[in-house]
Image (tube, helix red, strand yellow):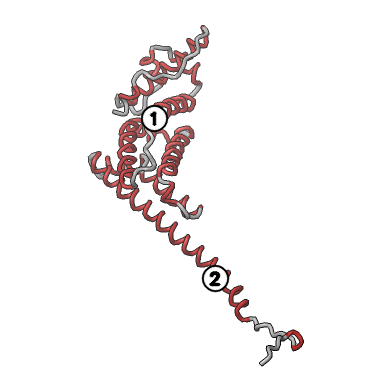
């Protein structure tokens, strides 16, 4: 599972005395924050985090200063774990296989981050850092879409590309997933099928727009050349002057 592939992987810790202790404290606090949220405490207090980390509340705030700093560090750690667990999908696979693999991968990741996303929903209206985290997840989804489905956007102009990439990003990130899972009460396999239909439809639209725009460009180029050709065809044939005419004897 997604979380199991994360086991034991930690960022390197500096080894010089005081810095090493400070880094260990920071990591303990981040792990405590993550652990509390995963255990269902969606709005843990500083005291709860400090207690779980085995540090004093004063030490916690001495290392992080405020909640925004802690949110930034926790968000960076979660993103690092996802980066480590990410397995690129082969872009040369047939389109249907790519869509299936991508949507299953997204579902696994979304189920993994579900407790943290729910926690974020509570605090995000009042936290710029959590709002930035949301944008980072959306940017990540759009980046993966561009890398995996670039062939479906050939010939698509920048405006249409941006619109469809935004729709694909929203369709494969938490706001849509939570609607499928919590509002519609769909199982994970059912939600994956809905996501696959959305992604397939949007990629088909992108590909269709690319073909239409390519045809429109070709028609414009042809229309631009046509007057020049007609002008050439309408010119009178040159007539040789009498002295230049060749007389063939009978």
Disc ID at residue 15 = none
Callout 1: helix, strand or loop? helix
* Position of 22 relative to 179 (above/below): above
The picture quadrant where one finds residue 224 is: bottom right
On the image, the x and y values in percent for residue 188 come to 25, 39
**C-alpha gap between disc 2 and disc 1:** 51 Å
**Residue for point 43% across, 59% down:** 211
On the image, the x and y values in percent for residue 241 come to 74, 86
**Who is closer to the viewer here, 51 or 100?**
100
Q: Select label 2 or label 1 by which is in front.
A: 2
**Residue for point 48% across, 32% down:** 129
Q: How many marks?
A: 2
Q: Quadrant of the N terminus?
A: top left
Disc ID at residue 223 = 2
**Residue for point 46% across, 63% down:** 215
* Position of 73 relative to 109 (above/below): above
**Who is closer to the viewer here, 135 or 3?**
3
The picture quadrant where one finds residue 101 is: top left
**Who is closer to the viewer here, 224 or 165?**
224
Residue annotated with mark 1:
82
On the image, the x and y values in percent for residue 41 come to 32, 26
């Amino acid at each position: 599972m997604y979380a199991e592939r994360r086991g034991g992987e930690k960022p390197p810790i500096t080894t010089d005395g005081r810095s090493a202790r400070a880094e260990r404290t920071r990591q303990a606090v981040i792990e405590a924050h993550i652990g509390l949220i995963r255990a269902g405490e969606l709005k843990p207090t500083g005291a709860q985090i400090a207690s779980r980390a085995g540090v004093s509340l004063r030490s916690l705030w001495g290392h992080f200063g405020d909640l925004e700093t802690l949110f930034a560090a926790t968000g960076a750690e979660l993103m690092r774990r996802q980066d480590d667990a990410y397995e690129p999908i082969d872009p040369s696979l047939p389109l249907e296989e790519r869509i299936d693999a991508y949507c299953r991968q997204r579902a696994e990741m979304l189920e993994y981050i579900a407790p943290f996303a729910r926690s974020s929903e509570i605090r995000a209206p009042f936290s710029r850092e959590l709002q930035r985290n949301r944008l980072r997840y959306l940017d990540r989804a759009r980046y993966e879409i561009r890398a995996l489905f670039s062939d479906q956007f050939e010939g698509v102009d920048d405006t249409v590309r941006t619109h469809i990439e935004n729709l694909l990003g929203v369709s494969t990130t938490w706001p849509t997933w939570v609607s499928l899972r919590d509002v519609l009460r769909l199982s994970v396999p059912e939600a994956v099928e809905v996501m696959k239909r959305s992604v397939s439809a949007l990629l088909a639209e992108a590909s269709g727009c690319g073909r239409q725009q390519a045809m429109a460009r070709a028609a414009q180029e042809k229309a631009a050349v046509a007057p020049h050709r007609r002008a050439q065809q309408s010119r009178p044939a040159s007539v040789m002057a009498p002295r230049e005419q060749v007389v063939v004897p009978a």
